[in-house]
Structures are given as structure tokens and as C-alpha cells.
């Protein structure tokens, strides 16, 4: 803050002014005041919030609001086990959230039925995959892969036809199946959705490791998998329910997340009823955590 000082009159007699000096002194004084005003204005612009250099930043650090917590986050493996910050989070607020995914458009599982983008929608924070009575269903693969990591998704599946399996899995980037593995960390075969399975596929002759857990999957639950050089572990609402540690079972290369409502019709299956699965969010974490 400037220290303004007022000149006080003196009792001394005025000093005679040399001829021709008065107007110049007045001009200099006015010019000085103008300069001071300009400097003050510049200082104000630089230090006020939003002022300053390129991009409208100020001298004070800018802060942004923390991300809104995901639904059910308190019972997620990511939070309960301290997996850190996810590298990818999908909340499925709109169709724009599908841009990071390869949505299937072609024949269905085992060349039965059709996988169509028409069967997938993302709206109001929910991804829905529908399967109809003709075996027209959907699936999609995340366009991001890694060797080792953690993945988690919040899923709900209403009671369904027994030909429809709701699945979250890791698929090898190499597309060499089954020798490069497959990790089905959530596969629902039970039409009542009261039992969920895990399958680890490996070897050229498609050997498998299998686990199962009972829970009411018609309600929202968090399903997660952790893949490290030592093990694969699956989690339900942050709690371990299946583990493999045999090195020959573990996948040899990078994998990516897939979400699928697969159709497994039998020769005698008729009157197939419409089925669906819903996903609230998915998260991908690096390993080790960052």
C-alpha cells in the first residue's frame, strides 16, 4: 500500500520561480500520476483471481472439485484394498462413454445368434445390454490393455433365460485362444442369478480352473479381478472368493476387459425369453498401484 503524504504550507516566503518553468513542472506531475495509475491497474490485473498469464491462471494455485464418488464405492475392492487411482473410469452417462470401446457387430458366441450395437445403450449412468428371443445380443471390448492389473465393475442382472450368460472377462490381445488364456471373473449361468462362476482358461487344449460364489446378483454388486505375476484373485464387494497361483495357469501376455451377454442355445431351446444385464460403472487400475 502506498504512503500518501500531503505537502504542508510553510511560513517561508515563496521562492521566485524561474521564467518558463511552471507549465513544465505541471506536465511532469500529471505524467507521473498517469504512470502511477497505469502501474496500479497492471498490478491489479496480475494478482486478481483469474488474471495473469496465458490461460487465465492467477498467481494462486487453482483447485478443481474432487470427482463424485461412484455408487457402491465403499464396498468396492478398489477402495477397500487401496488400489489407488484408476487409470480408466467409465460411468456410462451417455453414448459418448462408448467411444473407448469396440462394440461388437457380427456373429454371436460360438457362431450362434448375432451381436449387434443395437442391443447396447448407455443412459443416465447405466450401460444396458439386451438379448432377445432370437439370440440377438451384444458385447464390447475396452480399447485399453495391460499385462497385470486390476479391473472392477458394478453389475446387476435381472432373472434371465437359461440360454443367456452375463459375463465380464479378460481377453488376450493376441487373439490366440485358448493358449493365451481367458479370465472370466464374473460369469452368470444360473437363470435366477443366485450363483456366479469364475473360469480361468489356459493351454492349447483349453484346460480350466473354476470357482463359484452364491449371492443375489439381481441386486447391485461389485465384481473385481486382480492379476499379478503371482496370482489371479476374484472379489465380490471387496472380499476374495476365488484364487489361482499355479504359474502355468496365468496368462502370458497383455489382456483387455470385455463385457458380454452371451447366448448359449441348446438344440431343444425354444421360447427363449428376453434377457438383459446392467453395468453401473467399470474401473481399470494399473499394477502396481500408482
Image (spheres, rainbow, N blue to C red):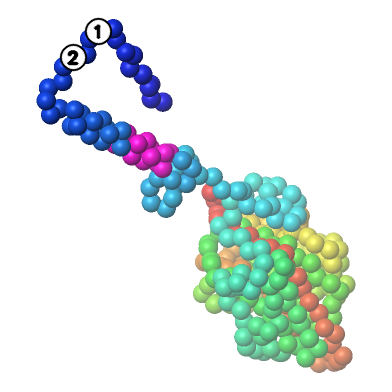
Q: Is residue 59 visible?
A: no
Crowding near the residue tagged with mark 2, few <14, some 14–19, many ≥20 C-alpha atoms within 10 Å: few
Over which residues does the magenta segment extend?
Answer: 35-47
Tag 1 near tag 2, CB within 8 Å? yes
Q: What's the CA distance linking mark 1 and mark 2?
A: 8 Å
- Res. 219 image quadrant: bottom right
Label 1 residue SS: loop
| Name of the residue lying farthest toward the top | 11
- Res. 222 image quadrant: bottom right
- In the rendered view of the protein, which quadrant contains the N terminus? top left
Give left or right: position of 271 versus 107: right
| Residue 246: % across, % down | 63, 59
What residue is shown at x 82% (from left), y 83% (from top)? 274
Q: Magenta includes 238?
A: no
Q: Name above or below for residue 24 compared with residue 244.
A: above
| Residue 285: % across, % down | 59, 56
What residue is shown at x 16% (from left), y 17% (from top)? 16
Q: Name above or below for residue 66 compared with residue 224.
A: above
Please name the residue that numbered disc 2 is placed on. 15
Which numbered circle lies on residue 280?
none
| Residue 87: % across, % down | 55, 57
Label 2 residue SS: loop
Please name the residue that numbered disc 1 is placed on. 12
Residue sitting nearer the eye, 87 or 205? 87
What residue is shown at x 22% (from left), y 34% (from top)? 27
Q: Magenta includes 39?
A: yes
Crowding near the residue tagged with mark 1, few <14, some 14–19, many ≥20 C-alpha atoms within 10 Å: few
Q: Could you tell me what secondary structure mostly forms the magenta stretch?
A: helix
| Residue 99: % across, % down | 57, 73
Residue sitting nearer the eye, 183 or 71? 71
Q: Is residue 126 visible?
A: yes
Give left or right: position of 86 versus 115: left
Amino acid at each position: 500500500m502506498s504512503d500518501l503524504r500531503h505537502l504542508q504550507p510553510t511560513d517561508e516566503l515563496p521562492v521566485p520561480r524561474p521564467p518558463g518553468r511552471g507549465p513544465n513542472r505541471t506536465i511532469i506531475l500529471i505524467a507521473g500520476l498517469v504512470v502511477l495509475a497505469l502501474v496500479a491497474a497492471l498490478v491489479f490485473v496480475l494478482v486478481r483471481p483469474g488474471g495473469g498469464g496465458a490461460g487465465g491462471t492467477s498467481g494462486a494455485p487453482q483447485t478443481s472439485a474432487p470427482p463424485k464418488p461412484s455408487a457402491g464405492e465403499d464396498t468396492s475392492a478398489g477402495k477397500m484394498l487401496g488400489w489407488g487411482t484408476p487409470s480408466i473410469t467409465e460411468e456410462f452417462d451417455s453414448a459418448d462413454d462408448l467411444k473407448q470401446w469396440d462394440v461388437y457387430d457380427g456373429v454371436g458366441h460360438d457362431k450362434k445368434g448375432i451381436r449387434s450395437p443395437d442391443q447396447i445403450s448407455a443412459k443416465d449412468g447405466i450401460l444396458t445390454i439386451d438379448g432377445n428371443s432370437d439370440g440377438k445380443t451384444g458385447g464390447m471390448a475396452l480399447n485399453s490393455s495391460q499385462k497385470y492389473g486390476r479391473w472392477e465393475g458394478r453389475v446387476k442382472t435381472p432373472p434371465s433365460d437359461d440360454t443367456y450368460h452375463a459375463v465380464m472377462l479378460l481377453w488376450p490381445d493376441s487373439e490366440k485362444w485358448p493358449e493365451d488364456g481367458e479370465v472370466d471373473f464374473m460369469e452368470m449361468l444360473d437363470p435366477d442369478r443366485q450363483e456366479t462362476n469364475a473360469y480361468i482358461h489356459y493351454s492349447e487344449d483349453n484346460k480350466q480352473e473354476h470357482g463359484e460364489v452364491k449371492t443375489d446378483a439381481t441386486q447391485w454388486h461389485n465384481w473385481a479381478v486382480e492379476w499379478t505375476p503371482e496370482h489371479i484373485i476374484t472379489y465380490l464387494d471387496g472380499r476374495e472368493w476365488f484364487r489361482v497361483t499355479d504359474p502355468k495357469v496365468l496368462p502370458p501376455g497383455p489382456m483387455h476387459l470385455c463385457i458380454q451377454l452371451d447366448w448359449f442355445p441348446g438344440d431343444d431351446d425354444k421360447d427363449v425369453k428376453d434377457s438383459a444385464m446392467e453395468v453401473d460403472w467399470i474401473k481399470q487400475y494399473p499394477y502396481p498401484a500408482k
